[in-house]
Amino acid sequence: MARSHITLAALATAAVPGFDPVQAQAFSTGMHGDFFAAIVTDATGRELIVRVPNSAEAEAQLGAEKYALETMTAGIRSRLSFDVPTLVGRAPIGKTFGLVFEFLHGHQLSLADFTVESGLATSIGTSIASIHSLPTHFVSDAGLPFFSAQDIQRQTRELVAKAKGTALLPAALSARWQEAVDDNSLWLFDPTVIHGSLGADSFIAGTDSVSGVLGWAALRVGDPAADMHWIINAPLDSQDAAFAAYGDSRHSLVDPKLRQRATLYSELEVARWLLHGVDQKSPEIVDDAIDMLDRLVDSVHQENTNAIGTDTAPVLTVTEVVELLDETPGDAAGGRYRGMEPVTDDQRSSNSLSE
């Protein structure tokens, strides 16, 4: 059931004491999951964003984000180099609920903004480093997921085994990925607090620096490379700038195999898509994944080695994966695969409450 911006304005009134809206604008979030959203403004100019889930998946995601944001105390937030959403209210609506946040102003980024010239590549590297520098105890104390390096190596090995078990994985990728998950030196890292679902569109920016980060539903302790794999999308000089800024901020705490694991995670998104197609019994998705795997093999064969090594170059990037997914016919088997979890936000279409 569709929720109009008028309905969401009424929810904001119920959820936030003393808030009296005079205008509401429909807002397309683009975040992973499906939401109705609106920006609601009162007579003082205060802007709030209201989000209501329209699926069970989105409801679970919104609940997870609510809990994650509640664990981020003022002290934790003060350690970050940017703002995060502030939850100001909650109210029931139908059989679900809506959440109300202070609206974060700024330009939501796309990969096209991720350039050395703009300064944003450096700012993003620094911003991610500030997340990874947070104390892990606040996550574990809240009961949020906490994965050791051994846990993550095992989980990644299981993912590769499942992909191999389809009998659809090309031999070159099977060997490449198996070698990576069996190389214990690749997995010698200290877990950090991670956002868990970063992409270019997770970031809100001002002129030349990050001012906010969205989509905290996957907050956890895990592999810092999981927050970096999407950077492999960018031009090489932008990648270098982001990883360099990250390293400058983290100093000696950066493990030497960070970028290698980020490359591996980027490639394994194709394996996830294949497994999704198999699980959904969708020939369209499986065929699409096989085509993507073939392209990935061609890229791997252009390298000097079949291993995820120090000089491993970007192979099939997440952006290319997304483009390929967009080419997938229809909504194959009940909806598009969401990958590793949340991502994006923007585009307004305004209407006055009086209309």
Image (tube, rainbow, N blue to C red):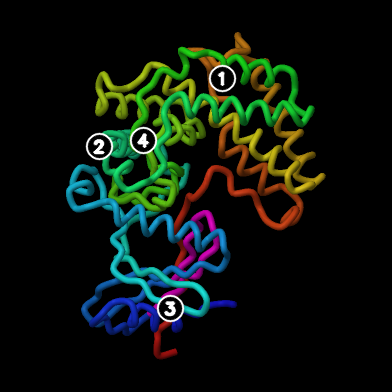
Location of residue 93 with respect to 294 vertically, above or below: below
Q: Amino acid at mark 2?
A: Pro
Location of residue 132 with respect to 349 vertically, above or below: above
Q: In 3D space, how far apart are the residues under numbered discs 4 and 3 (Cα atoms)?
A: 36 Å
Q: Amino acid at mark 4?
A: Ala
Q: How many marks?
A: 4
Q: Nearer the viewer, residue 304 or 115?
A: 304
Q: In 3D space, how far apart are the residues under numbered discs 3 and 1 (Cα atoms)?
A: 47 Å
Q: In 3D space, how far apart are the residues under numbered discs 1 and 4 (Cα atoms)?
A: 29 Å
Q: Does the CB distance between marks 2 and 4 fall below 8 Å? A: no
Seen at 39% across and 50% down, the residue is: 216
Instruction: Tell me the element at label 3.
Output: helix
* Mark 2 or 4, nearer chain start: 4
Q: In 3D space, how far apart are the residues under numbered discs 2 and 4 (Cα atoms)?
A: 24 Å
Residue 8: numbered disc: 3
Q: Nearer the viewer, residue 185 or 239?
A: 185
Q: Amino acid at mark 3?
A: Leu
Query: Badge 3: how crowded within 10 Å, few (<14), some, or many (20+)?
Result: many
Q: Which residues are magenta?
A: 24-37
Query: Can you identify the residue that label 4 sits on?
Result: 121
Q: Amino acid at mark 1?
A: Val
